[in-house]
């Protein structure tokens, strides 16, 4: 019997109901299933209902009482629960569920040193060492003492090794969803069969967003104790995500979805296919179609508005076209380039008898300190010449300050140009930003056009210099693709290099 048939039979035994008139599960190999529409699916149509007791959480596992006694909750508690249930084999009621999965997901924490070298220069390069240490520390500090304290509870667990624990952590990292506030994260059968596509998570105002306030729990591995545990929660294996994305209600509003100038990615529109909602009355989760889907087409979920580096880190794959992908620039490099360029311009203008301000050094130091203090607001470049809001704010404050405008330039600029950049921090076009900054200074503050042009050019040149330096980090070697690891590394590398080259091309044309 194929993997999909075994899995569907197990789902029936767990009272997981899926709409056989709308969807079918396809796949003959563990970890390689997908969902296909068997008829035209209408927006808002219910595709499946999953009882919460069928999900693996810290409250449904046989280990619940011990986890509660030891105050092990959150991501670490879930990893222990999955490791325990998987180790029970056929004694676990989820044995049929585990049969549908690979033994582990081959994430970068398992990659060899030679494989990791292929990530050179990328946003994920150098992250795996700390992730590995965190998992090993959790095993030694929490799991080993747990087995020693409760030997009877673990006597039927077939594999209690660190490797088995790492395997469970990889399954949780790549498959777990937010279930509800009580259960926290959990393994949700069937919901985790849907493959990922790039989507903008935007839904009708008529529906509340379940679980979206906490941006740290979606498909991530957390270590340490939580409520009552005595320690502040830390993120480990996979940090940063969009919690509860898979639990957002539908339908989406009927409108175009665009990000960084892109209306689709990988030949698919940037609109959610499904949403998973919390049916509290029936203590279950419902999978709902968030978009109309044609018969014969694969139905996708989205694992979050994630960049390619996060996709590789969390799931071991990424996609060629991704408007959420970004590349970080070195802030210190930008600041240094700006200082040198602006001082050179100031000196030239002073020689011409047009000294614009007396305290250029003070302005540079103040604005640099403000930007540098915001370590959690990195300078990101996005596809098609788009920039993150941190670069936008830096550009606005620096150009206004260097032109002698003594106002709160960010608030004024945003109010004048009706952008929601600070409230809704989506990337903006660099060309758009420069055009509107120059217009604001020349038309509203009557600053000489030549001065504004000089200062915006200085900022542009500084970003170009930082971008060229960032590009050098990838090296010159061409990558060959012979396996899935090399494919993921090459797609990630190529997508980031494209962002940098496109930005340079656009800026040098301006």
Image (spheres, rainbow, N blue to C red):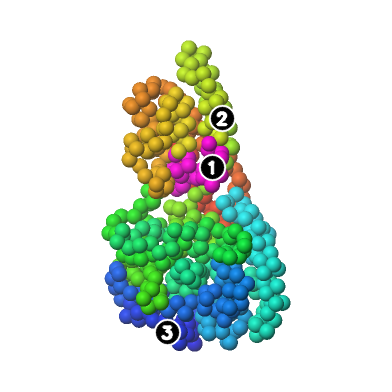
Q: As rendered, which of 11 and 60 lies closer to the eye? A: 60
The secondary element bearing badge 2 is classed as helix
Query: Which residue bears the numbered disc 1?
Result: 374
Q: Which mark is residue 365?
A: 2
Give the vertical position of 339 relative to 318 (above or below): above
Badge 2 or badge 3: first in the primary sequence: 3
Q: Is residue 175 left or right of residue 440?
A: right
Q: Which mark is residue 15?
A: 3
The secondary element bearing badge 1 is classed as loop
- Kindly identify the residue that appears in the image at 55 percent across and 79 percent down: 61
Badge 3 or badge 1: first in the primary sequence: 3
The answer to whether the residue labelled 2 contacts the one labelled 3, judged by CB atoms less than 8 Å apart, is no
Q: Mark 3: few, some, or many residues within 10 Å (few <14, many ≥20)?
A: few
- Kindly identify the residue that appears in the image at 69 percent across and 81 percent down: 151
- Kindly identify the residue that appears in the image at 60 percent across and 49 percent down: 121
Query: Which stretch is magenta?
Result: 370-392
Q: CA distance from mark 2 to mark 3?
A: 64 Å
Give the vertical position of 293 relative to 336 (above or below): below
- Kindly identify the residue that appears in the image at 62 percent across and 60 percent down: 231
Q: CA distance from mark 3 to mark 1?
A: 49 Å
């Amino acid at each position: 019997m194929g993997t999909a048939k075994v899995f569907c039979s197990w789902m029936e035994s767990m009272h997981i109901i899926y709409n056989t008139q709308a969807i079918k599960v396809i796949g003959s190999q563990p970890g390689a299933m997908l969902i296909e529409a068997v008829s035209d699916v209408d927006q808002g149509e219910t595709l499946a209902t999953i009882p919460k007791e069928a999900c693996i959480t810290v409250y449904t596992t046989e280990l619940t009482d011990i986890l509660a006694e030891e105050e092990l909750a959150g991501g670490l508690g879930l990893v222990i629960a999955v490791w325990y249930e998987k180790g029970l084999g056929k004694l676990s009621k989820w044995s049929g569920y585990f049969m549908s999965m690979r033994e582990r997901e081959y994430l970068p924490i398992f990659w060899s040193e030679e494989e990791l070298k292929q990530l050179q220069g990328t946003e994920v390069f150098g992250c795996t060492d700390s992730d590995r240490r965190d998992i090993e520390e959790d095993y030694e500090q929490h799991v080993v003492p747990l087995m020693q304290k409760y030997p009877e509870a673990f006597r039927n667990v077939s594999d209690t090794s660190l490797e088995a624990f790492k395997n469970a952590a990889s399954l949780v990292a790549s498959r777990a969803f937010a279930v509800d506030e009580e259960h926290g994260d959990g393994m949700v059968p069937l919901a985790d069969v849907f493959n990922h596509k790039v989507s903008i998570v935007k839904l009708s105002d008529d529906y509340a967003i379940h679980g979206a306030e906490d941006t740290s729990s979606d498909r991530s591995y957390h270590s340490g104790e939580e409520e009552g545990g005595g320690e502040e929660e830390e993120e480990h294996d996979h940090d940063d995500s969009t919690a509860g994305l898979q639990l957002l209600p539908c339908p989406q509003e009927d409108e175009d979805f665009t990000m960084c100038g892109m209306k689709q990615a990988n030949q698919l529109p940037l609109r959610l296919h499904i949403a998973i909602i919390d049916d509290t009355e029936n203590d279950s989760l419902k999978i709902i179609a968030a978009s109309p889907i044609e018969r014969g087409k694969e139905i996708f979920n989205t694992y979050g508005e994630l960049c390619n580096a996060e996709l590789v880190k969390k799931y071991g794959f990424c996609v060629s076209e991704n408007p959420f992908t970004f590349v970080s620039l070195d802030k210190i490099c930008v600041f240094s380039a700006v200082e040198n360029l602006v001082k050179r311009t100031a000196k030239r203008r002073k020689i011409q008898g047009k000294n614009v301000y007396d305290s250029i050094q003070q302005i540079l130091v103040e604005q640099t300190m403000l930007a540098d203090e915001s370590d959690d607001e990195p300078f990101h470049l996005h596809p098609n010449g788009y920039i993150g809001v941190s670069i936008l704010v830096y550009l606005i404050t620096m150009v206004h300050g260097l032109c002698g405008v003594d106002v709160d330039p960010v608030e004024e600029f945003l109010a004048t140009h009706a952008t929601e950049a600070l409230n809704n921090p989506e990337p903006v076009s660099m060309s758009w930003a420069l055009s509107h900054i120059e217009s604001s200074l020349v038309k509203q503050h009557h600053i000489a056009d030549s001065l504004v042009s000089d200062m915006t050019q200085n900022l542009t040149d500084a970003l170009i210099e930082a971008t060229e330096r960032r590009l050098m980090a990838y090296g010159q070697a061409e990558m060959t693709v012979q396996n899935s690891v090399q494919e993921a590394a090459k797609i990630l590398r190529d997508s980031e290099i494209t962002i940098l080259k496109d930005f340079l091309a656009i800026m040098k044309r301006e």
